[in-house]
Image (cartoon, coloured by chain):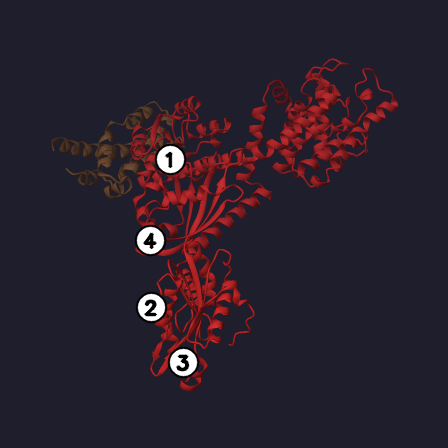
Chain colours: A red, B brown
Amino acid sequence: MTAQKRHSRERILIVDDSEMNRSILADMLADEFDVTEAVDGEEALEILAKEKDAFSLVLLDIVMPRKDGFDVLAEMNRTNLIEDLPVVMVSAETASAQIERAYELGATDFIMRPFDAFIVHRRVLNTIFLYVKQRKLLGIIEAQIAEKEQNSALMVDILSHIVEFRNGESGPHIRNVRIITDILLRKLLRKTDRYALTERDVSAIIMASALHDIGKIGIDDKILNKPGRLTKEEFAAMQKHTLIGANMLEGLSSHSGDLLVRRAYEICRWHHERWDGGGYPDGLKGDDIPVSAQIVALADVYDALTSERVYKSAVPPEEAKEMILAGKCGAFNPLLAECLVEEFDQIRGALAKDGAQMESHREVRNYADAAIYPKGTGVSERTLKLLDYERMKYNFYAELTEEIQFEYLIEEKILKLSPSGAKRLGVEQELADPARDLRLQTQLGIGWYERLMEHVRATSPALPEFRHECQLRIGGELRWYNIIVRTFWTDGDVPVIESVIGKAVDIHDTHVAMTELKEKSIRDPLTGLLNREGVSEQLPQKLAAFPERKFALAVFDIDFFKKVNDVYGHLFGDKVLCEVAERLVHSTRVHDLCARIGGDEFLIVFDYEGDIRSIIARVFKSLCGKVEDFDVTVSMGVVEMTDETQDYEDLFRKADIALYASKQGGRANYHFYDDSMGDGVPHREG
Amino acid sequence: MTIEECYKMLGGDYADAIGRLRSERLVCKFVLKFPSDGSYDLLLRSLSEQNSEEAFRAAHTIKGMCQNLAFTALANSSSVMTELLRKGDLKGAEQYLSVVSADYERTVRAIEGFGRSTAGA
């Protein structure tokens, strides 16, 4: 059903002279596609000419009256329509020569008659998918390149216009040189493979052509704008603009590796060299002159000739071409001269119209084509391979883990899940509007989407990640998961979250183990009371939980415990400790802190109202009493907490002083700390 | 007459047709449509006018339709006819026409019989 919904707007053109054949195909596809029929090649071409963007696919018979399938393919090649519109041949032709010819003419697929309805249907769908994907890819690449190059292009434009303005050149000289460079360079690359240039090089050269005269910034105004002929000295100074420009670029040391800068350097320095070696500044000859500079030199001369200047009128294009070919305006690479002749009409046309936009689109298209259909060993091929490899790697790992990996497109409201993740959640790999999905609500709990989005919205472009541990009832079992998420933001002044990726990792077992371990680490194994670490960890929480209450801390130890061990043995000693711990737990409340902080040393922290003395008296009393034949008594010291004595160590020390006082007083009693006790307590025993 | 019987009578392979077209409704629909297709008449006319190109296209169309509908007998004979005409062998084609015509008439008779029984049902 979703498939039908998604493709309801795709249109297919069926071209077959047999009404019955058309009708069979139409019947197979009419459920999911809009179908238009053409009775022969001629009608098909008429329909395509009128509505070339309307169709997603053409099903094309070969043998037809008027124009056959090959004629249609040939015409689609001529208009380049074949690049954007997939054609699937449907024919009873079995001769391999015919099939080969169809493929050579750009057919995407070939379905032999008699055909299987399922296969026709599947191939049509696959082909359309493929093209939709390709178009998407193209769009992504276009957007990325446009964005990246926009900045450079803007800077280059500003810079070159400054130069233009200062040179007093009227008219769009920079733009024209750029257009001519573009056309000549591409023509040259089609003509010969002598120059190994990638699409990135081409793009950089075309952009850099605008910078060919930046060195004129460093030429004296008086020479630059002198109306009459230059003297020999003035001319020599003028020639320096090539080296000045090159030096300027060389000075950009932090960008010296940049392709654009390198190309601009070549062009600036050598665009006044001559093929015969008679140019300046270095007198390079032939292909020692970088091809970028060769082309810009020709473009520069042609545009200078055909443009009007204060000191001269414009030469007609035809005449300018002849002058260049006759070697009256310099000496050029013969191959380039050929390019000029062959592309002459195109250059004139391009210069005449204001085609800045078209030009940039074509550039992008070339770039994108090079990326999608890599030729040779360009960077793009490698990149695509790497991308492919990464994707394979990712899929491999995704399948190995128990993680639920996901991607969520905010605006489209589409949730994509890893195959194993989808399986665990019992849903499809791709879900629209997951917030309303009842199955997800059952698995993840009501309000899961809102909770997730709350975390998502708390991220920022600078801090796009978050981790969150929570319990989820996936598959009916409540377990702990670690949710790790990264958000992706749009660029621009007000970034917006575009998508979210992340995974839910089942950490239940480690979480439970950690909790247990932690619990163990703060407990005394013999009595189950807290230990010293447990107190120092839980005390601050306890104080914070009851900020208005009064608190007291008491420490006590068992009188003559050392003797117990000596006389009755350690087993009995342990029994006494456990019994005292039990009495302690019984005489205090659940939320009081009870701890065994040393051999026979215990500690209590509790909050209270009213008279602390009666509370301590009660606790003290309940701790004392016989364990078998041994009469247990304790010595205790108590300190009341005030706002000034929040420090645990300090409290402990004061309680200890009070305890010492109790021992001094003959044991089996308790004392409250007061400042008169001072802190002159000798070291505690044990 | 059932559609299977019709196929048996015209020398076709019903199992193949239903296997590819996936629906009895579709098979019946196109089978019943077959006699009204003009390609056979075009083949006869073009042959009498010695127009081998037009005749080739007509034979080719018949072949394609028959292959799709799994009318095996007529698909085979029209296929031979197509190859003769592709070479421009008008004489050979005229001689072979009787084979194609016999298959064609058998096919149409079977379909008409089937058509009557579906109309009656």
Q: For the residue marked with disc 4, what is the amino acid?
A: Arg
Callout 1: 10 Å neighbours few (<14), some, many (20+)? Answer: many
Pointer 1 residue:
A90
Which is in the foreground here, disc 2 or disc 3? 2
Task: In the rendered view, tell whether residue A127 sits above or below residue A360.
Answer: below
Q: Which residue is mark 3?
A: A573
In three-dimensional space, the C-alpha distance between marks 1 and 3, rounded to whole angstroms, equals 96 Å
**What crowding class fits label 4: few (fewer than 14 Cα within 10 Å), some (14-19), or many (20 or more)?**
some
Q: Are marks 1 and 3 in contact (CB under 8 Å)?
A: no
**Which badge, 2 or 4, is on the more N-terminal residue?**
4
Residue under pointer 2 = A586
Mark 2 vs 1: CB contact within 8 A: no
Residue A83: x and y, percent? Answer: 49, 32
N-term mark: 1 or 3 = 1
Mark 2 Cα within 10 Å, few/some/many (few <14, many 20+)? few
Disc 2 and disc 4 in contact, CB within 8 angstroms? no
Residue lying at the far bottom of the rendered structure? A567
Q: What amino acid is at disc 2?
A: His
Say which quarter of the image contains residue A196. Answer: top right
Residue A310 percent coordinates (x, y): 75, 14
Label 2 to label 4: alpha-carbon separation: 37 Å
Left-right relation of A2 to A380? left
